[in-house]
Image (cartoon, rainbow, N blue to C red):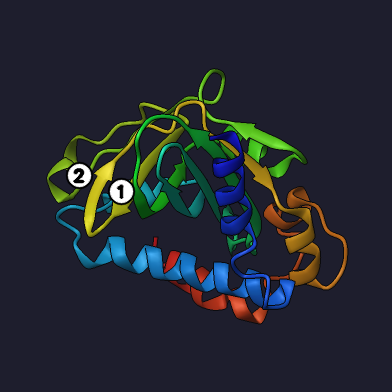
């Protein structure tokens, strides 16, 4: 079984290997913009605008989970931070893991993590892994316009998901997210750190302007 799930993970992580690293990162940026659009399409069930307006940053991941006897999941996406004069460029992130039990088929889930505090943004700015939970609290976020009036800060990170058209706040406690330095280097054309990107020291690439413009309404 272990060989099976590791094989699935390898397949998921290399599914875009026929494209260049820069083009793959651009696809992740475009996908992030599409995910934001999906949440905006049904405001009655999506992220309350007040939550987005108060956000210090946003992380967006698309995760594919596949399995039969066991399962494996792999995901990638980007994180951006709010600056004094707008939003930063995107920094590449990824996640993965194994599961147990009978889980047949393939499922794609899109996640939005709203970073509510400077500490949450700082965690994504460091090299290495970010583990959600513990000192960096994460909770299912409030949903829809009906929650708008009663929204107050409850966690460093609010998490949301879309799977097969269903919108939900979801707990991601224990999830490990990694910085993808190779993708950042390919996208920006030189070695850059996540901290440099999210602090605004690196210019926003032309390919990321659509994503930044979408977030600038908040």
Residue at left 21%, top 53%? 166
| Residue 157, horizontal then vertical, whole percent | 45, 35
| Residue 63, horizontal then vertical, whole percent | 47, 52
Q: Is residue 66 above or below residue 34?
A: above
Q: Nearer the viewer, residue 177 or 8?
A: 8
Q: Is residue 65 above or below residue 158?
A: below
The answer to which quarter of the image holds residue 178 is top right
- Sequence-wise first label, 2 or 1: 1
Pointer 2: what residue? 148
* SS category of the residue bearing label 1: helix
Q: Tell whether label 1 touches label 2 (CB within 8 Å).
A: yes
Check disc 2: other Cα within 10 Å, few if <14, some if 14-19, many if 20+.
Answer: some
Q: Is residue 199 above or below residue 26?
A: above
Residue at left 30%, top 53%? 162
Residue at left 22%, top 44%? 143
Q: Is any part of residue 9 visible from this angle?
A: yes
- Furthest toward the right, the residue is 191
The answer to which quarter of the image holds residue 118 is top right
Quarter of the image that includes the C terminus: bottom left
| Residue 180, horizontal then vertical, whole percent | 71, 53
Left or right relative to 131: residue 35? left
Check disc 1: other Cα within 10 Å, few if <14, some if 14-19, many if 20+.
Answer: some
Pointer 1: what residue? 50
Q: Nearer the viewer, residue 212 or 72?
A: 72
Q: Nearer the viewer, residue 11 or 30?
A: 11
* SS category of the residue bearing label 2: helix
| Residue 37, horizontal then vertical, whole percent | 34, 69
């Amino acid at each position: 079984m272990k060989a099976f799930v590791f094989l699935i993970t390898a397949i998921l992580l290399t599914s875009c290997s026929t494209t260049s690293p820069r083009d793959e990162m651009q696809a992740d940026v475009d996908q992030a913009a599409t995910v934001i659009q999906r949440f905006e399409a049904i405001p009655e069930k999506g992220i309350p605008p007040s939550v987005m307006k108060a956000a210090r940053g946003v992380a967006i991941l698309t995760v594919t989970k596949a399995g039969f006897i066991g399962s494996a999941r792999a995901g990638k996406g980007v994180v951006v931070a709010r600056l004094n004069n707008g939003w930063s460029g995107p920094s590449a992130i990824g996640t993965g893991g194994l599961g147990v039990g009978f889980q047949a088929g393939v499922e794609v889930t899109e996640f939005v993590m709203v970073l509510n505090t400077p500490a949450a943004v700082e965690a994504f700015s460091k090299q290495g892994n970010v583990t959600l939970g513990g000192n960096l609290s994460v909770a299912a976020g409030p949903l829809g316009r009906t929650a708008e009036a009663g929204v107050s800060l409850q966690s460093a990170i609010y998490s949301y998901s879309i799977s097969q058209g269903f919108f939900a706040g979801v707990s991601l406690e224990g999830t490990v997210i990694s910085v993808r330095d190779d993708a950042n280097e390919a996208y920006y054309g030189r070695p850059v750190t996540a901290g440099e990107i999210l602090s605004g020291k690196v210019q926003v690439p032309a390919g990321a302007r659509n994503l930044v413009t979408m977030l600038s309404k908040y």
